Image (cartoon, helix red, strand yellow):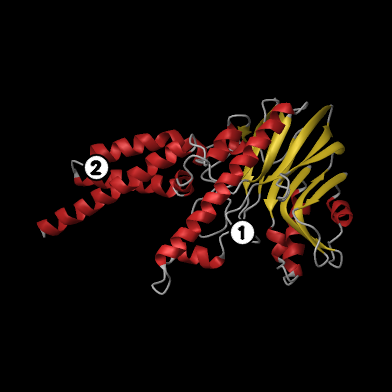
Amino acid sequence: MFGIKQYFSKIIAFLNVIVGIGIVLSVIAHNISPGKIAFLQITGLVFPSLAMLSLAFLLYFILTKRKFVVISLLIVLISLSSYPRNFQITIFNKSVPEKNDIKLLTYNVQRFGISNNNEGSQATRDTILNFLIKENAGIYCLQEYHSTSGSLYGPLKKIRDTLGAATYYYESYYNPRYNQLSGLAIFSDYKAIDKGKLKFQGSRTFGIYLDLLINSDTVRLFNIHLASIKLQPADLDYVTNTHPDKDNKSSSIEIYHKLADAYKLREKQINLIRKEINKSPYPVILCGDFNDSPNSWAYNNISSELNDAFREKGNGLSKTYNGPIPMLRIDYIFTDDFYKAKGYHRYRHHWSDHFPISSIITKD
């Protein structure tokens, strides 16, 4: 029996070291550009899981009084620097805006469940729209917004009027095909005086902005959708449940290349966004789908310019990805120092592969 316990402890110790290596890589990943070492960014996707495992291993070694407790404690201490990016506890969190506060909601609606062949549930679109109306936000930033002229809520003006918004701005990712458009949309109670978009020649628009008159101030609002990894359902199934009938080597290489390409493109997109932030003549609010974790180079470079509403007023982990990778936060709301967050909320609605988030912000 003693031999079995000793053997089990050695296995746990080995796994602890593997987790520790993953944590070290994920902690340093946010400082290394994907153009130099792309694979480091992958470790950031699983940092919350690695952190939880490291705490479980530490507790095990403390209870069993094993000598590995020192190594396990060191691993946990290394991970602590990334905790504020991923985990928060807030006592005072405003849920209802007061006069002159701004309530902003961002949501990747995943085309409202409509497929490329225009097949899908109108009920999903209606449910999401009713949710948006109920939230009564002053600003809505939607990614993967989808419309067709024939649908009940297709025309943007009709949705703007339904939401009671004063203005809207929409930019398609692609050229119109089959009478369908998919892209970024902003609906706002506030008057817009200018607009613009962010894109590289030959690629899709990945960001739009509106200059809004909010109370007595002019604010530049960015709605961002960074490059996705473009993993297909079969890829995700392979990652989470490896099938013996699949070519493990070729599948792994293909998925890695998809990840690396997305990280490198996001690096270019982030560099352009930072330039736009720095040259903005107005205070900046930025939100959207980053397709990247808080331990990523992309997040680190935006959070060095702006304040993360989750880190100011969030609770827990705020998982925003509704998919097979656990505890993954990839949707964000940022403000510059002109504003501060008074509240932050993540909604548990399963109508998309993302969960919506909102924040109540006010002039600092």
> Would residue 323 appear left or right of 243 to someone viewing this image?
right
Q: Nearer the viewer, residue 47 or 188?
A: 47
User: Which quadrant is the C terminus positioned in?
Assistant: top right
Compared to 259, does 76 lie above or below? above
Identify the residue position indicated by label 2 in the image: 62
Which numbered dot is residue 3? none
Of circles 1 and 2, which is in front? Answer: 1
Tell which of 138 and 15 is nearer to you: 15
Q: Is residue 212 above or below residue 154?
A: above
Pinpoint residue 29: horizontal percent, then vertical percent: 46, 39
What percent of the width, then of the height, locates residue 174?
76, 56
Residue farthest along the bottom direction in this orientation? 245
Q: Who's the residue at 48% across and 48% down the image?
A: 45
Q: Quadrant of the N terminus?
A: bottom left
Q: In the image, what residue type sits under mark 1?
A: Asp
Residue holding disc 1: 353
Report, in whole angstroms, how far the alpha carbon at label 1 lies from the one at label 2. 39 Å
